Image (tube, rainbow, N blue to C red):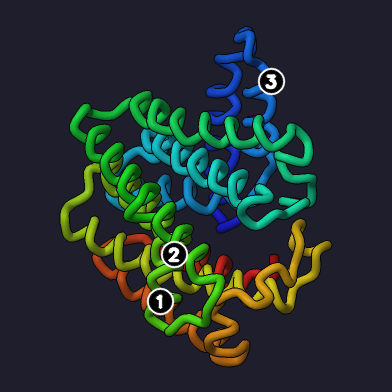
Amino acid sequence: MRMDEITGEYRKYIDQILEKWLSNFENEPQKILYDAMQYSLLAGGKRLRPILTLEFCRLCGGEWKKAAHFGAAVEMIHTYSLIHDDLPAMDNDDYRRGRLTNHKVYGEALAILAGDALQTDAFSCVTSADLPGEAICRAVSVLAEQAGSRGMVGGQVLDILSEERELTEQEVLDIQSRKTGGLIRAACALGVIAGGGSPEQLDAADRFASCLGLAFQIRDDMLDVIGTQQEMGKGVGTDDGKNTFVRLYGLERCEELVQEYTQKAVEALQVFDDTEYIVAISNTLTQRKV
């Protein structure tokens, strides 16, 4: 199959899992909460993280559909983080994926609660996977660590604290390895766990995720400068004055770093067979225009 066909199949299956998950609550009296959750969760997006989960499961010899609830859970965590990032107290954005942000449609209170619900429901989704109990326990632990105070949320805190001063290279890396890198590391690790992978494969997946996460974030910082709102589906230039990789290195050096980190990510995959797809998707993500 071609890369776009595999990606399409993965995305379609993840969307089915997410839609089915939300459909379980149609008759609940707090239905407006699920409407707000659905508004952001099913708004499209690359589905990068669940795709990585499904693919690493396959690379480890597992049946990739078995990892779908793990991948869906990571996407729920990611979506909650976007809802909260867009709030006035955080980035104060009006648009996300070409549509009004959640709080612009449902109000701040419900947007906060929709994010809260997606975060906690994600762990319920993990436990719904058709996998051994040991794998589910490991997945819960990994997702909690990478999404919580030591991972994504910790990175967000460091980002907020950095707004009043210019950071060193290491400080920028500390932020982005957690804020963006945490969920990418979780996604890859959950795929290995679902596929019954070895410690060697888990280590390789983590090295891949760390490098891909940095390449992805550097490219994202570049697009905030060179992209347009129409292309991006959200505001651009919003990182002006922030401690981004572009501010640290400049556009030319950032382009070089994207290529270097992508290459390092690909090199980490040597312990796996049949890596043509994941190499192709990695290159596509780090060369993207949106």
- For image coordinates 51% across by 42% down, the residue present is 75
From what the image shows, is residue 283 above or below residue 256?
A: above
Residue pushed farthest left? 199
Q: Earlier in the sequence, mark 2 or mark 1?
A: 2
Residue 282 at x, y = what percent? 49, 66
* Image vertical order of residue 5 relative to residue 289, above or below: above
Asked if the residue at tag 1 contacts the one at tag 2, i.e. Cβ–Cβ closer than 8 Å, the answer is: yes
> How far separated are the C-alphas under marks 2 and 3?
33 Å
Viewer-proximal residue among 139 and 150: 150
Q: Position of residue 138 (x, y in %)?
A: 23, 39
Task: Give the CA separation, mark 3 to mark 1.
Answer: 40 Å
What is the three-letter code of the residue carrying label 2?
A: Leu
For the residue labelled by badge 2, is the local secondary structure a helix, a strand or a loop?
helix
Q: Residue furthest right?
A: 230
Q: Secondary structure at mark 1?
A: helix
Residue under label 3, please give it: 32
Residue at the image point whose x is 62% and y is 87% from the top = 251
Residue named by callout 2: 158
> Does the rendering let one see residue 283?
no
For badge 3, the amino acid type reads: Ile
Q: Categorize mark 3 by other alpha carbons within 10 Å: few (<14), some (14-19), many (20+).
A: some
Is residue 94 rendered to the left or right of residue 262?
Answer: right
Tell me residue 50's x, y (percent). 47, 46
Work out which residue is located at the far front of the displayed protein and give it.
Answer: 164
Tell me the element at label 3. helix
Closer to viewer: mark 3 or mark 1 = 1
* Mark 1, residue position: 171
- Compared to residue 43, the image places residue 123 above or below, namely above
Q: What residue sits 39% from the left and 56% below the top?
A: 154
Q: Which one is earlier in the sequence, the residue at label 3 or at label 1?
A: 3
Q: Residue, x 59% and y 84% (percent of image)?
A: 247
